[in-house]
Image (cartoon, helix red, strand yellow):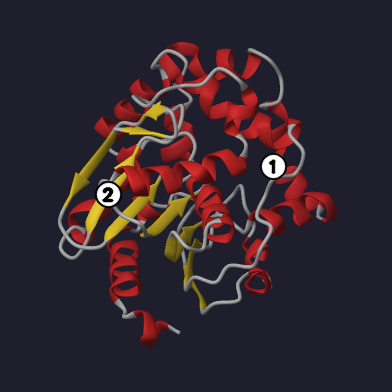
Amino acid sequence: MQANGLRFHYVTAGEGPLLLLLHGFPQFWYAWRHQIPVLAKKFRVVAPDLRGYNETDKPKRVRDYRLDVLATDVVALTHALGEKTAYVAGHDWGGMVAWTAAANHPDVVTKLAVLNIPHPRQMSKHLITSFRQLRKSWYVFFFQLPWLPERTILKNDASIVTPLFRGLAKNKAAFSDADLDAYRKALQVPGALTAALSYYRASFRAPWVGPKHRIAAPTLCIWGENDSALGKELTFGQEKWVKGPYRIEYIPECSHWVNDEQPEAVSSLLLEFFSQKMETSA
């Protein structure tokens, strides 16, 4: 599918209102494998490989991965799929994109769900004011280096995938060998890892282009409480960035990989939230 000047690869299932599922780093559409069949019972679910990932086109310039540009991908995908509006859910970097799209394009994003990622301005504030979060986010600074992060991550057939996913998970069984193999292969697609790291690099090199407005769309935040990279405190007070209805659901004994570790809980929450009529969720 062509959108915003790029060819996007995606998977789709179901019929009904359009629901976009945006994955995070270092995953691809497959991160939503558990949620797609459940949500497809009521929605036209589309899970794309985000800009640069897996089988989607990979712009070369770092500035092509700025948050404001990524947010326009959501708009372009919605229109390319023949719709004017969409429900949007995002995890990790997909959540960053979803937050920004909902804030910058309220005429397109009518409902928003974010998983284990704070509002971009909340994240920025904590990186400046919290040494604890700064320490947790050491990898963000490592990713600013040229070529070394790519070499480190892809070393030994991208063997880092196992400790990254299964190692950090509370429920180790959440990731099968086949799952880990799928993530390894996606990371090794030529140019995909550099593109994925460009999300982090653009966030440092470009002037601040995060959300400029409070979010009007009804918003659900789902948060695995044992996220080793992003502290739970990042969620405290973030409702100030949302002027529409806001709700947060914490999931105990669960890591950053919340949609992998607790698929039934996440699917149920998303299905219930997006199925609510707009007037009853306000």
Instruction: Looking at the picture, tell me which residue is in the foreground, 8 or 246.
Output: 8
Instruction: Tell me the quarter of the picture where residue 41 sits.
Output: bottom left
Instruction: Tell me the quarter of the picture where residue 49 sits.
Output: top left
Q: Amino acid at mark 1?
A: Ser
Instruction: Looking at the picture, tell me which residue is in the foreground, 32 or 64.
Output: 64
User: Is residue 152 something one can see in this rendering?
Assistant: yes
Residue found 56% across the figure and 54% down from its top: 117
Q: Position of residue 106 (x, y in %)?
A: 51, 63
Tag 1, which secondary structure?
A: loop
Q: How many marks?
A: 2
Would you place residue 30 above or below residue 107 in this image? above
Image side of residue 146 versus residue 115, left or right = right
Residue found 70% across the figure and 45% down from its top: 209
Looking at the image, is mark 2 or mark 1 nearer the viewer? 2
Instruction: Tell me the quarter of the picture where residue 271 sits.
Output: bottom left
Q: Amino acid at mark 2?
A: Gly
On the rendered image, what quadrant is the C terminus found in?
A: bottom left
Instruction: Looking at the picture, tell me which residue is in the foreground, 248 or 74.
Output: 74
Residue found 54% across the figure and 72% down from its top: 216
> Which residue lies under the disc numbered 2?
82
Image side of residue 196 versus residue 120, left or right = left
Image side of residue 83 versus residue 239, left or right = left
Tag 2, which secondary structure?
A: loop
Q: Position of residue 83 (x, y in %)?
A: 30, 54
> In whole angstroms, how far apart are the C-alphas of marks 2 and 1?
39 Å
On the rendered image, what quadrant is the N terminus found in?
A: top left
Q: Around disc 2, counting alpha carbons within 10 Å, would you say few (fewer than 14), some (14 to 19), or many (20 or more)?
A: few
Which numbered tag is attached to residue 137?
1
Q: Position of residue 224 (x, y in %)?
A: 49, 60
Q: Around disc 1, counting alpha carbons within 10 Å, would you say few (fewer than 14), some (14 to 19), or many (20 or more)?
A: some
Q: Position of residue 21 (x, y in %)?
A: 36, 50
